[in-house]
Image (spheres, rainbow, N blue to C red):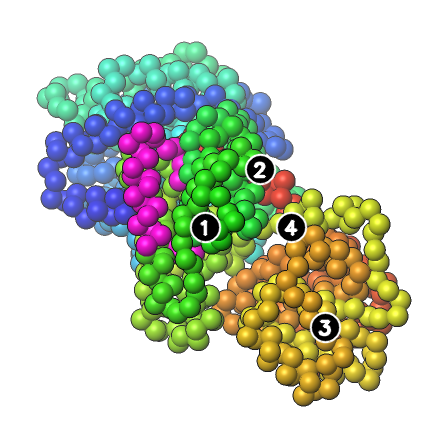
Amino acid sequence: MLSNRLYYNFKPYLPWHLRMVMRRMLAWRQRLVCKDTWPINESLGQTPEGWPGWPDGKKFALVLTHDVEGSSGLAKCRQLMQLEKGLGFRSAFNFVPEGDYETPPGLRHDLVNDGFVVGVHDLKHDGKLYWTREKFSENARQINRYLKAWNTHGFRSGFMLHELDWLHELNIRYDSSTFDTDPFEPQPYGKQTVFPFWVPKPQHDGGYVELPYTLPQDSTLFLLLREQSSEIWLRKLDLIAKHGGMALVNVHPDYLRFPGEPKSSRTFPVERYVELLNHVRDNYAGNYWHATPDRMADYCAGIQKKQVKPNGAIVHSVSRATSAKAGSVLKGKKAVILLFSVYPNDARPRREAQALVRQGMEVEIICLREHDSEAISEITNGLKVTRVPFNHKRSSQARYYFEYGAFILICAAKLAWRSLRKRYDLVHVHNMPDVLVFSAIVPKLLGAKVVLDLHDPMPELYTTIFGFPPNHWFVKLLKFSERRSIAFADLVLTPNIAFKNLFAARSGPPDKIHIIMNSPEREIFSPRQYAHNPSPAESVFRVMFHGTLFDRHGLDTAVKAVAHLRQRIPNLQLDIYGKRTKYVERIEQLAIELGVKDMVHLHGKKSHREIAEAILTTNLGVIPNKRTPFTEVNMPTRIFEYLSMSKPVIAPSTIGIRDYFNGDNLLFFEPDDSVNLAEQIAWVHDHPNESSDFVKRGRNIYKNHLWIKERRRFVTLVADLFRA
Ligand SMILES: [Zn+2]
């Protein structure tokens, strides 16, 4: 978040009291807004699927941790250690390796000897640990040195910042930088569970255990909110005990006031903490598993090993827990959707908008008006559409950017004006352009959550369309805008794994970026929708392409492949569906030159229904994409469209597609290689039975991404913004 960066940059220059006054003002509002989800969020208690319970049949678990922030905290470690020991508890002390103090090896040694645990807390504790991926990797190498030197495998970031995907670079068995619910932290997205969970390393066996803290931090309760009793701790602990979860608390020795110390607004009486420990001892004796975080991590890693599922049921349970009650969270909330294109043509914004309407939200859309036939304002399917009259001409690049800029200003002004009369809870912005997200500035300042939906990565798309070199100033500008836009948004959505990886690697943070796939519309792309159910004619072997007719879609490769097959499959026919473009003339010319004009048929633009019917009468679909920076990472929905109609499809072997399919469930060809494409077409022609086996296996992948499933994930992600 931009505001976080500003804060950490200026923090060293702001006096502590001023910082606290600012934070208290924010916290006061935060507490009102989040009163249903903090400190108690009733829906957090769900037991993970496949959860075997705690060791020895204990009802719940208790984990105590301490982050030592400065030298005053360091000075109190031994006192705190004696106090806990006296009450029969053991905890973990996390030290900052390169902070304001140096941890005496003797202290670490004594802690471990007495059954306590030592962990690494951040590196410098300056809020900059995760600023860029490169910087983090550098930091990770340093942290790994300290982990090794201190003989520990536990970590927690400063300020509870977290990028769980990045933490795989650390040699850790557990991390504890997240929480179930805590709207007061700079990264306020809670994990929505009071159970530990497994964070799998992508494409590898390993991973680590994440231990979210589930009782509020002492600093939040006693310094920020100035609570006078431990009542909130006790209440939350009772709730966790009731649900059989893990109570994990973080108490800072720096903020503890032991008897005899002078009163100060920077400390709170140690009695509050003792009350918590006594409450557990007195009310739950024999019923709880008291573990240090390393033992907790070992126990959970053991469960993980026994799980059959690759991602682990513990992890699955986290998203499961969050899917509950999305409707009740979103009902009655006000959303506005910004779209620099016409509505309702594009399925993605339309279906997402309708998903929000289904949850009982009040939804408006601001989009372009390209034709006089479109109403300037209308209410359709429960949502209000406002069309901005815009002579949208893609005549020149300059004109295009002018239009982008004008539309952003118009949207920003409209939202600012409307915000005077009503409060938006959500602004959902679709790219392109990415920077349209900044239109949401006024609603965001007034508390609205901002979702940025990145349909396509602009740098790759523009590099591909205009042939810019990768270091072109304009590509750099696009990357810069992307980074800023993602930082500005609260949630980023994108349609496939490769896009997400791309955004996370250069703009981060991965935690914020989620995949909602573009799945074909079942009302159109399902054979059952067509009563007469046409099927391919016997006399021809029809190969089909549909989509926009651009150079990158490689129709020339397809036409060349047809020419290679002229002798082998004389009844072959290539049917091309799509709006006429300049590129089509080149394709026609090529077909004449190669002597296959009679085999290539151009059908022009068709409706989705007509496309679906055409698919039914075809033998094979092709996605003849060239290899470009954009097509390399794209995952064409057309693959799903053919599979949904039970047709074989040949796709290019690119990263974006290989993230979902492999050589067992999809037919691949090498992009730009027309001979290879011809071979694959011939194989399908010669092997109808084997081809339909491919279709069956491919359909299993498709079925994992039906829109009903994607929609549920979308709604849950949006609801989480309000639960955090
Ligand atoms: Zn800290």
Say whether disc 4 or disc 2 marks the residue closer to the N-terminus.
Answer: 4
Category of crowding for the residue at label 1, using alpha-carbon neighbours closer than 10 angstroms: few (below 14), some (14–19), many (at least 20): many
Q: Amino acid at mark 3?
A: His
Check residue 369 in the rendering and tell me which mark sits there, or answer none. 1
Distance from the alpha carbon under mark 4 to that under mark 1: 25 Å
For label 3, the crowd category at 10 Å Cα-Cα, with few meaning under 14, some 14 to 19 and many 20 or more, is some
The amino acid type found where label 4 is placed reads Pro
N-terminal-most mark, 3 or 1: 1
Where, by quadrant of the figure, is residue 707 drawn?
top right
Disc 3/disc 1 C-alpha distance (Å): 33 Å
Q: Nearer the viewer, mark 3 or mark 1?
A: 1
Which residue is label 2 attached to? Answer: 712
| Viewer-nearest of discs 2 and 3 | 3
| Mark found first going from the N terminus, 4 or 1 | 1
Which numbered disc, 3 or 4, marks the residue closer to the eye?
Answer: 3
Look at the numbered discs 1 and 2 and tell me whether their residues touch, using CB distance below 8 Å: no
Q: Does ligand 1 reach within 8 Å of label 3's beta carbon?
A: no
Asked which quadrant contains residue 387, the reply is top left
The residue drawn where x is 30% and y is 16% is: 230
**Residue pictured at 40% horizontal, 40% vertical:** 427
Mark toward the viewer: 4 or 2: 4
The amino acid type, in three-letter code, at marker 1 is Arg
Amino acid type at circle 2 is Arg
Which residue is disc 3 drawn over?
A: 601
Query: Which residue corresponds to mark 4?
Result: 520
Closer-to-camera residue (123/351)? 351
Q: Secondary structure at mark 4?
A: loop
**Between marks 4 and 1 in the image, the one whose residue lies nearer the viewer:** 1
- In the image, the segment drawn in magenta is 406-434
